[in-house]
Image: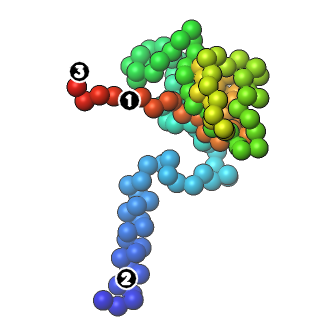
Amino acid sequence: MTIEDVKHLLIIFLAAGYIFCPNSCHAIDPNQDESLVTQKTTPVIASLLASKDYTQYAKVNKIELKDDMVKVVIIVNEELLPRDFVSKYDLKEFKIRKNTANAYIKLDALKKICEEPGVIFVRLPFKLRTLFK
């Protein structure tokens, strides 16, 4: 096998990885026209916020809503404290650990919190599921 063969295999491998990898693993291009909500959340949260009937979308996708609030995990820069967002965005039932907050947040506040420069990412909490009913 020659060096040229290795180069061709590497190019094929990288191209295949780029094609088959979900968008979330690609670097975010700052010149892209994506909204901050799309960049800083999972596709499920972005779709929830974009849906016209969010209660139906939440029900179909098994997202827990409580008083028109959704439970999320908010990850912020290490320079910031998640506690700074508690009163500003009216977070409920929150638990804070280092640069992460688990809390219920209103959907309109969720859009706004994604626009904060110190917020790195917002996702739904992980749910443990059993294999047996």
Structural distance between the alpha carbons of marks 1 and 3? 13 Å
Q: CA distance from mark 1 to mark 2?
A: 43 Å
x 38%, y 79%: residue: 8
Amino acid type of the residue that numbered disc 3 sits on in the rendered structure: Lys
Residue drawn at 52 percent across, 36 percent down: 42
Q: Tell me: residue 10, above or below residue 117.
A: below
The location of residue 65, given as percent across then percent down, is: 51, 15
Q: Residue shown at 52%/54% (left/top)?
A: 26
Residue to which mark 3 is pinned: 133
Classify 46 as above or below 90.
Answer: below
Indicate the position of residue 58 as horizontal and vertical percent values: 46, 19
Q: Gap between marks 3 and 2, in whole Å?
A: 50 Å
Q: Secondary structure at mark 3?
A: loop
Quick one: which residue is furthest to the bottom in this view? 2
Q: From this viewpoint, which residue is outermost toward the front?
A: 97
Amino acid bearing label 1: Leu
**Is residue 106 in view?**
no
Secondary structure beneath label 1: loop
Quarter placement of the N terminus: bottom left
Quarter of the image for residue 16 reads bottom left
Q: Quadrant of the C terminus?
A: top left
Instruction: Specify the farthest residue to the top.
Output: 67
Q: Quick one: SS at disc 2?
A: helix
